[in-house]
Image (tube, helix red, strand yellow):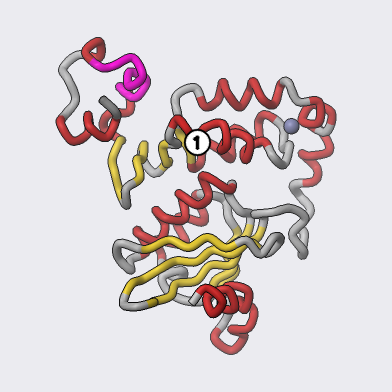
Amino acid sequence: MNLKTILEEGWPHHKKNLPESIRPYWNYMAEIHEADNLMFVGDRIIVPLEQRNYVLSKIHESHLGMEKCKSRAKQSLYWPNMFADIEMICSQCSICNKFKRQNQKETLIQHEIPARPWEKVGIDNFEYKSRNYVLVVDYYSKFVEIRLLQGTNAQSVVNNLKAIFSVHGIPEEIVSDNMPFNSHFFKTFTKEYNIKLSTSSPTHSQSNGMAERSIQTVK
Ligand SMILES: [Zn+2]
């Protein structure tokens, strides 16, 4: 029995009637929901067990140090004992410990050119054979992620972006130039995640060329 089944069939009256693996979710019962085939606690995505080690390695990849790793992860991700797992991996890492101070200073410096993968991404919507997709391209590696959307609303786009970011990490900057990326809902999402949103104006649409070129390639 997994969390999805419990959600469909209803929660038991007592925590002890839950399987051991589901008990940590008991206190979040009211906030757990499903959308776009993903599980959420509030607006944080629940990382499936088999992906946790990989996601943990992504959280730690930039060696931001324990506190920054935790604060970035808690904006978007959830799994039982997530903080303990992050503390474990960072406390055992000599780079995180050694560069703790420098990292705190470095966050104040703005980089024009991304220094690492998944720091700056371009996003765009497109339609192909009557289906709607969202495309995310990483400026550093040119790596492209595409998700089929259930609807064209900002909520569906945001849910899919959360899934992509849960795997690759949360970018610091998103470049986009069309709806629904201008919507209030989308802006609230980027604000909550502490992502800088660069919306190019119609007269300067070439500034999101990275995402648009990728769409042509994909099609
Ligand atoms: Zn580290």
Q: Quadrant of residue 205?
A: bottom right
**At x 42% / y 55%, what residue is drawn?**
160
Q: Quadrant of residue 48?
A: top left
Q: Is residue 18 above or below residue 34?
A: above
Identify the element where label 1 is drawn. helix
Q: Is 175 one of the magenta-colored residues? A: no
Left or right? Give the position of 62 relative to 158.
Answer: right
Q: Quadrant of residue 172?
A: bottom right
Q: For this rendering, which residue is in front, 31 or 77?
A: 77
Q: For this rendering, which residue is in front, 3 or 69?
A: 3
**At x 35% / y 59%, what residue is drawn?**
156
Q: How many marks?
A: 1
Q: Is 19 one of the magenta-colored residues? A: yes
**At x 79% / y 53%, what residue is drawn?**
109
Residue 38 screen position, x and y as percent: 35, 45
- Span colored in magenta: 18-26
Assign the N terminus to one quadrant of the image.
top left
Residue 32 screen position, x and y as percent: 30, 35
Q: For this rendering, which residue is in front, 121 or 102?
A: 121
Residue 125 screen position, x and y as percent: 44, 72
Quadrant containing ligand 1 reads: top right
**Cβ of mark 1 under 8 A from ligand 1:** no
Q: Is residue 205 above or below residue 150?
A: below
Residue position marked by numbered label 1 in the rendering: 51
Q: Is residue 66 above or below residue 188?
A: above
Chief SS of the magenta region: helix
